[in-house]
Amino acid sequence: MQRFYFDHNATTPVAPEVLEAMTACLGQVYGNASSIHHFGQAAKERMEAARRQLAALMGCPPADIVFTSGGTESDNMAVLGAVRARAGARRVVTSAIEHPAVLGPCQHLEREGVQVTRLRVGPSGVVDPADVRRALRPDTALVSIMHANNELGTVQPIAEIAAIARAAGVPLHVDGVQALGRIPVDVTALAVDLYSVSGHKLYAPKGVGALYVRKGTALEPIAFGGHHERDRRPGTENVPGIAAFGAAAELAGRTLAAESARLGALRDRLEEAVPRRISGATVNGSRANRTPNTSNICFDAIDGEALVIALDLRGFAVSTGAACSSGALAPSHVLTAIGLSPDRARASMRFSLGRGTTAEQVDALVDALEGAVGHLRRISAHA
Amino acid sequence: MSGGVDSSTVAAMLVRQGRAVIGLTMQLWNQRRLPGLSSDGATGRCCSLDDVYDARRVAEQIGIPYYVVNFERQFEESVVKPFVEDYLAGRTPIPCALCNNFIKFDRFLDLADSVGAHEIATGHYARVRYGQASDRWQLLRAVDQTKDQTYFLFGLTQRQLARTLFPLGELAKLEVRDLAREMGLAVAAKGDSQEICFVPNGDYAAFLAAYLEESGVPVEPVRGEIVTSGGRKLGEHEGVHHFTVGQRRGLGVATGEPLYVIATDPRTQRVTVGRNDELLRAGFTARDVNWISIAGVAGSARAQVKIRNKHAAAPATLHATDDPDRVEVRFDAPQRAVTPGQGAVFYDGEVVLGGGWIE
């Protein structure tokens, strides 16, 4: 069976040029980047080259980048580290549509007595900067808002939020895991303090990420050990992963403009065909300001879990909701936060496109959707 | 696929027969939901991550697509809530029968339709056969009488039976383990699951308390009297939901002769105890009767009636009532501990005629 991958927001395949950079490093560069000898220096060199590559994509000085094991670690480091670094910190402002990697540490802080304000968003799926301003208090330690939402693709007004936070003297963390490589990101121009990214969302392997820490931002470490990453993140660096991340960043920088135009056109092709061919199909969230590769569509009276399985059996990988530990699905907190009923949230599918996606694949997906949705509706009408 | 040896073997058998099989595990209950209930080392837990891991591993091994589907919402509505309500109302529920009726053969079949599967197969020990003469699908006891699970399957409808496969119905448990071993299944030596899957260690009173507390209506501390059938007070207790008809242990009253729970009354919180022979009943009414191998009884019919899972079906006469959903059951000889809330299943030899709930 031919298989088509429409789940690039979950993860992306490793790009050939990234794989090459990684295997070259894996095979040849085995020193510990902290060692003073030749082998250590070679590893360090490789790592610093990758840091420069990533810094170029993010628009920041290389020294402001801390490599981590991925987006979740970066988010935890930022949220826990920034709050704990601020004496008298009693409050965090975030949004209801954040990724669990941000909501989780916030909840943890709540148990330690920190007040967490989760800003609500309307049906657009976009945080209102005025809400951020209203939520700030003198004892607010951190604002944490995502750049692009993983389920809707909606892009948040980070520059405006950053201006508000800066005026109030509160650091801003941005979870940029779904933004980097999909839309232009310039953390200096955005004027944010902390920015989390993950390699495997932009064609690098799993297990490598980074946190941008603007020079001067107070951040307590969350793990303790050696002096790696300028005392900000202990642990022997994942040099091959970091090399791959660097190569992926360079690839993204080179292809971003053309690729985002191409994916935007494919996404529009999908969103034009689906409502035309399938009744009761509505795009969730704002269509104006989104990452070009993401489309979230609700199919009236459909059990999303059954649709995902039916599509997978036809060779199409899409996603719905959030997978829990067993692999079963729970209704998405993002979709319920933008006002969808649990039933409509369960009836919604996320399609996320990527480098391998073609117009033929999109057309095949629309055909499969039409068949599967029609079948599901016919049998539920008989039940 | 529960991750146990039975459903794993079924999946592997069907693959071996050359059928196109899709493996599904139903996520029914979040074991971490009631943190007050320690389930460490608990037996018979359902939907644990270990079980899902095992099921996934078997699916990989036999090369079939595999999915975990979330039926937690439906399970709570159709099984857990009625389970709690039954206990509070002084009945002794059998959640497995409810789960079979409303989840395993209902939602599961819908899902099969959704993904284009023609039949469903489970690891239950029972047999299904089409009866030419009656033009009905029949449910029969498993060949392995010690494993027979038809008692929990009396709610199956004709539509469900028509599309259900019970490949283990013809096999003995030992043969199933042999098959699993022979096919090299990773779970071949895994222990059988027992008790009620969502209640850790079978402590249903603790489950009730934790569940009700979570839902914001904690069980109010109640005290009731333990009395003899003559009305003599023997002691006190902390709620009728701690008792079930026929129970002997844990009464907390000391008398010269063994005493059993004869009846519980949630309204007065009174638990009546008595001698073993006071437990005997000549009959009862079954409600919400589902007919399987026959369309119903006109007037009366002979049957063997099983009133709990471990009961040896006793000869009885079924009498139709004005209400087609109710049947009067009259035993030939009085039976011990007829317990409201339990199922009553009517057999004609190995054939399940139908069944209902003891009123």
Image (cartoon, helix red, strand yellow):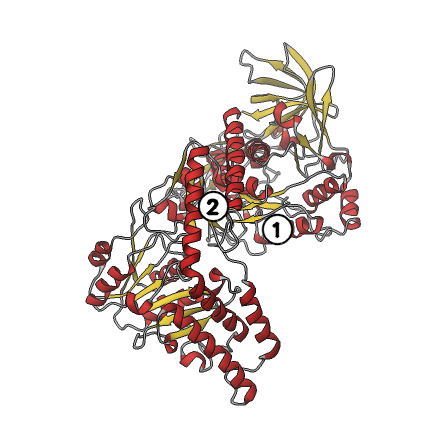
Q: Relative to A4, say whether B240 is above or below.
A: above
Q: Position of residue A264 (x, y in %)?
A: 41, 50
In this view, B109 is above or below A293: above
Q: Residue at x 64, y 41 (%)?
A: B22
Q: Element at badge 1?
A: helix
Residue B51 image label: 1
Q: Which residue is mark 2?
A: A320
Q: Is residue A315 left or right of residue A129?
A: right
- Mark 2: few/some/many CA within 10 Å (<14, 14-19, 20+): many
Left or right, residue B232 beside residue A166: right
Q: Are marks 1 and 2 on the same chain?
A: no
> What chain is tagged by disc 2?
A
User: Mark 1: which amino acid?
Assistant: Asp
Left or right placement of residue A130 versus residue B83 in this view:
left
For residue B204, say whether it is visible: yes
In the picture, the quarter occupied by the N terminus of chain B is top right
Front-most of residues B13 and A174: A174
Numbered disc 1: what chain?
Answer: B
Secondary-structure class at tag 2: loop
The outermost residue toward the bottom is A37
Q: Name the amino acid type tagged 2.
A: Thr
